[in-house]
Every structure is written in structure tokens, then in C-alpha cells.
Image: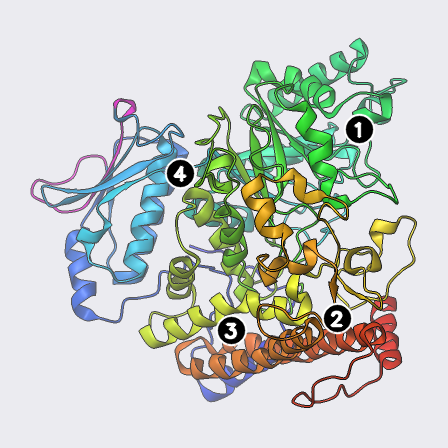
Amino acid sequence: MISPNMPSRYPLKAFFAIIFLLLTGHDACADDGYRLWLRYERISDPKMREAYSKSFTFIATTGSSDILHNAAKELQNGIAAMTGTQVPIVNTPAKNARGIMLTVSPALNAVSRTTDGYSIGLESGNVTIKASQEAGILYGSFALLRHLQQHLPLEKAVGESSPKIQLRMLNHWDNPEGTIERGYAGSSLWKWYDLPETLDPRYEDYARANASVGINGTVVNNVNASARFLTIEYLPKVAALAGVFRKYGIKTYLSIHFAAPKTLGGLKTSDPLDPEVRQWWADKVKEIYQIIPDFGGFLVKANSEGEPGPQDYGRTHADGANMLAEALAPFNGVVIWRAFVYKADPTADRFKAAHEEFVPLDGKFAKNVIVQVKNGPIDFQPREPFSPLFGNMPRTPLGMEFQLTQEYLGFATHWVYEAPLFKECLDSDTYVNGKGSTVARVIDGSLHGYPLTCIAGVANTGSDRNWTGHPMAQANWYAFGRLAWDHTLTAEAIAHEWAQLSLTTEPKAVATISDIMLRSRAIYVDYNTPLGLSRPWTGSHYAPEPWQNRSSRPDWTAIYYHRADTVGLGFDRTANGSNALQQYRPEVSRLWANPETCPLSYLLWFHHIPWSQKLSSGRSLWDELCHKLYSGADSVVWMQQQWKLVQTSVDPVIHADVNGRLTKQFGEALWWRDAWVLYLQTFSQKPIPDSYPKPGKTLEEIKRSVNSYLIR
């Protein structure tokens, strides 16, 4: 079961909730969120509990591998916790007994080309979990437990399932000193100074959680990589983590510093076409595989935001990726090369950068290279159109990069369920091969026949006791894993499922929580970046600062993106502007190029709209902005009210924690609302509609509050 680590910090309200429990005689073993969606709570219905108990009198497995052992142990522990019945693990079950049969047979060939598929059946009174690979047995076991946790009839568990994408990964942006870039849940999970000698039990719990949703790869360090991870000091530490992860079917990957041949090897260059450099990487890769035999490969951020890369030597991204691919190929390793690249060109449109850099290289990458593309063309904004790279590189496997950590979504203060964001991108139609050519079909390989497929989520985990800082942010980790396995699942189904597994099985409470989750992202966008505004400027990525206009490069300012002036607001990306829309297929660009047909959610991404122009909502741009900003902030009050309705159905510690965060979220939503309204009003010169209360502070007072926040 989950190991009892001490918390690194509790929110104040959660602390007082624990004190309340102790003083009033309530159960002191409150749910602090550590168990995630693997709580395995005792089933309250005695009839269902008895029915499950009678169906599971043994768990039979003929194998003895670590993965099979962990599958059987997970079933044993989960069933015991839910039913109160201890189920033995056996090699040969007693005659006429009813139980669970775990069967690995290569002849089954699983259910898909990914080999991770499984089937659950009912045969001769037994529940069978079959797969062609051991990992499939593990995934099938977790699927069965997920089914039982929702108190569903056993016969409804019958069926087959297989992942649509081969590599389903978390990318950790963790640094060797224990910090996390864009981490909002404490410090790194990896205790580098204790490794490799000491293995924190939390590593196994992390692996269990990932395996339970089908995640099979982990990049343990930051894409802004330290070359230190490639040294003999750190490789044994990474190997120790890999030793834990492989028992749950998870491969370990490293982000690399492209200039390592110079910084570590003492070479005069890191030119990817230099024979000595190529040999250095070949030797380094061989060394890694001697220490970590099942090493997955490299993730690379190169020639982006100051990171070194092949362009430093007049070479292309393909040259750099192929050099690494050549070194990894003998070991079946892969190179995942990030497409987050943009130059400091004051006349360019950053929106277009990745397409301009990578489309000319289509078909020039080695067969074990995946180009990893962020879901949108800028930088993990609260709402972005899909990246125009998707559909435009048919001869190069493109992987998806989503961000689970809430860099632009309120850190660990704001409740934002990200599955609607993921689905919005995955379900977008590129029209590259006609209608139905969705982004999901690009990344799962079905559209272009990619031999390798990949989806990655930038992790939101940290050392906080509840893993993700905000308890509700656990749902984003969970949703990513479920969609990585099957992108046809709906955000609604996943929300309902997660709430049942993580918080409560009371139907009315589950419906209420799911409703909050499904509306939370749209609410955040309304008070933060409505109508297609974006804000990836420097600073904290958190405080409202639409006036920010000083930086070493224009695309690191706020004004570069919103283009507010006395005429109107928005970035013109039509043929009259940067013409970024030309990078999409005609069916897409025609829709978005016309402000009359462009969805309001994308309007200011593509158009500079006059303040008085009437929109499809019937309001002028100025009035619509005010409507969105005010209604978004007011909707946080609705979230608070709805959350109070489930107080008796949710653990008091978690309820108090979320309640406190919602209080803070409302205050910060007002902060964002007032900053945008008062700043944009200096250009529009229009009054705030009488139906809305006037901000309680002046623009200068808000600017001072932002400066105070940034200084601390």
C-alpha cells in the first residue's frame, strides 16, 4: 500500500481541519490526497462487497517477473482494502474456486501494434486478464481495480483495450539541486543526494500511479538540461530510479545538454557532423546502456531560448537529431527532439516559427527520431489554436507535448481541469487528408503511418504530500494518462471517473464535482485571457502584467501579443498581417481568417478588432471583453458555492484545502479582471458598463501590487 511519507507542507486550512478531527474524535487517518486515485476505499454496500468477495478467492499467475508480481500484489491489496477479504496469490488455483487468472501469451499478440493491450473476460466463473506482454497484464489489473472502485457489475468489465499511442510519457523539468522549473508542488521527487544508495518509497508509489493510467515513460530531468546528468556521478542515480520504474513497465529517459561534448568531453566543438563529436556521443550512449540496459533515449531542447544546438555550427535540427539517433539506434533508443524553437526576430511572428523551422526538414530525420510539438504554436497558453505543424510533416513522426503543471493556468492556486484543453486540441481537424484528419490521428500515427508515436505531459508532481499542490490538479495527471491511452475518451467521462476514484462515490456529489471540473477551464480563460488574448511574457507567468513592455527581445513582452492600441486589440495574422494563417489548410484558414466566422475563443489570436466592432455575441469588442472578464471572476463564486454542497461527501481535510484555494482564486480572479479592464480602458477610452461594479483599485495601485508580488 501507499507509504506514509511525512508532508512537506500543508495549506493552513487543511492543518486546522486535522486539528478539528483530533479534537472532535473523528478519524485521524484523514485523506490527505497522497493515495491519489488508488484509494481502494472499503465498499459500503454489503451485497456488492460480498459479491466481489465471492468472485475473488484467488489470484493465479504462472510468472515470477517483477511486473507480474506487482500486478498480482496490486490486485491483492486493492481487493483486500475494498472488500475486507485477503486473497491469496497462487500458481495453481483450487478446483472449482473462483478468482482472477493472469495469463501472458505472445500468441495472443495482444490487441494492437503497441503490444501493451489486454483483455478482461469471464471464463468458467473466473475473471481472466490476458495480454501478449507482461505490461499488458499490469494495465489490465489496474483497469479491473478501477472498475471495482466505481462499484460496477463485474460483467461490465469484460472487453479489450489497447493504447492508441506507443510512448506515453511524463517530462519532468527537475534540476539537480532539487528545484523544478515551473513546479508548484514543492521540490523535486528525486532526492539526488540520497541516490543511488537510498530509495525513497515514494518512487514506487509514483511508478504505481503512472502505470495505473498506462504511462510507460519518464524523462527525469529538465529540458534546460544540466550536462551533469550524463556523468558517472549521476548515471548510477538515474539507474537507481530506472530500477524502480521498470518493475512497473516504465522506461527512463534523459534530457541532454547538446554542448556536452565540449563541456564534459573537453572537445573543441559540439558540431554534430564532426567525427570526434559523433564518436563521443556513441561512447556516451554505450556507457549509459551498460548502466541502464533498458534506457529509453534522449529528449532534446536545442537552439531554443539560449540552449545550445546544431544551428550554432550552421547545421540543421535534423543534423543534430540524426547524430544522436545514430548513437542510440544499436540499442533501440529514440531521440525526441522538441520543436519549441523561435528566433529573436523583432519583425517575425513567433506563432510561425516552429512551422518555418521544421516543415522544410520533413523526411530528413532518422527513423528513430520523433519531433515533439507543443499543442499550440506559442507556449501552453490557457487557450491556443492547434499548432500548424500537425498535419504538415507526414514523413516525420510528430509527438504531442501537453503541460500538466499550470504554468499559465494559475500555478497551484487556481482549480483548472485540463482535459477540455487536451480534447480541444486532439479533436481539432487539420483537414490535411480531408475532413476527419484530427490532431489525434496525426499523433497516433493512423493518418500518416508513423512507425513511432508519442505523447508527453510536462509533469505537475512534486514533494508536496498530495503530489500536485492543488488536490484537484491530480485530475490533470490522471486525465493525461487516460487520454494518452485512449484519446477518444471524453473529458466528462474522465472527470466523473476521477471524482469517484479520488473523492467520493456518492452520485450527487460526483455529478457536482464533475460539473465544476468541466467548467473550470472556461471560467479561468474568461477572467484571464478571453477571446484569444495571450500572455507568455517574462516574469512570474502568474501575475497580471499586460502593460509589460521591457525585455531583451520583443516577443518576451506582453504588448507584443495583445497589440492593444487606440484602434483596437489583437494580433493580425491574416494576409494583411503576419499571414500565419497560411500555415493551415484552406478549410481551417478560411474559417479563422474571417472575423465573422472565426470562433470568439480564437478571435484575437488572428484579428486586430476595433473596440466598437459588434461581435457575433451581439456586443461590441469592449463590452464583450468586460462581460467575459466579469462573468469569469463571478463564476469562481459559483465554484465556491458548488464545492460547499459536497462538504459532507468529501474528506474534511481535502474539502478545507480546496475551499481555501478557491477563496484565493476568487481574489486573484478579481486581480486579473481589474488589471485587464483598467489597462485596456486606457486605449478604448470607453466606460465599464453600468451593470458591473467598478474596480476597487486604480490601475497604478494594481501595478504596484504586481510589482510587490514580483519582488517577493
Residue 309 is tagged as 1
Apparent side of residue 217 relative to residue 127 in the rendered image (left or right): right
The residue under label 4 is: 163
Q: What element carries label 1?
A: loop
Residue 86, x across and y down, in percent: 25, 55
Amino acid at pointer 2: Trp
User: Label 4, label 2: how many angstroms apart (C-alpha)?
Assistant: 47 Å
- What residue is rendered at 50% in x and 58% in y? 420
Q: Is mark 3 on a helix, strand or loop?
A: helix
Residue 654 is tagged as 3
Question: Mark 4 touching mark 3, by CB under 8 A?
Answer: no
- What residue is rendered at 86% in x and 63% in y? 548
Residue 377, x across and y down, in percent: 67, 45
> How dense is the environment of label 1, judged by Cα within 10 Å: few (below 14), some, or many (20 and up)?
many
Question: Of marks 4 and 2, which one's residue comes earlier in the chain?
Answer: 4
Q: Residue 68: name its quadrant.
A: top left
* 433 or 110: nearer the viewer: 433
Q: For the residues carrying marks 4 and 3, which lies nearer the camera in this image?
A: 4
Q: Is mark 4 on a helix, strand or loop?
A: loop
User: Label 3, label 2: how many angstroms apart (C-alpha)?
Assistant: 44 Å
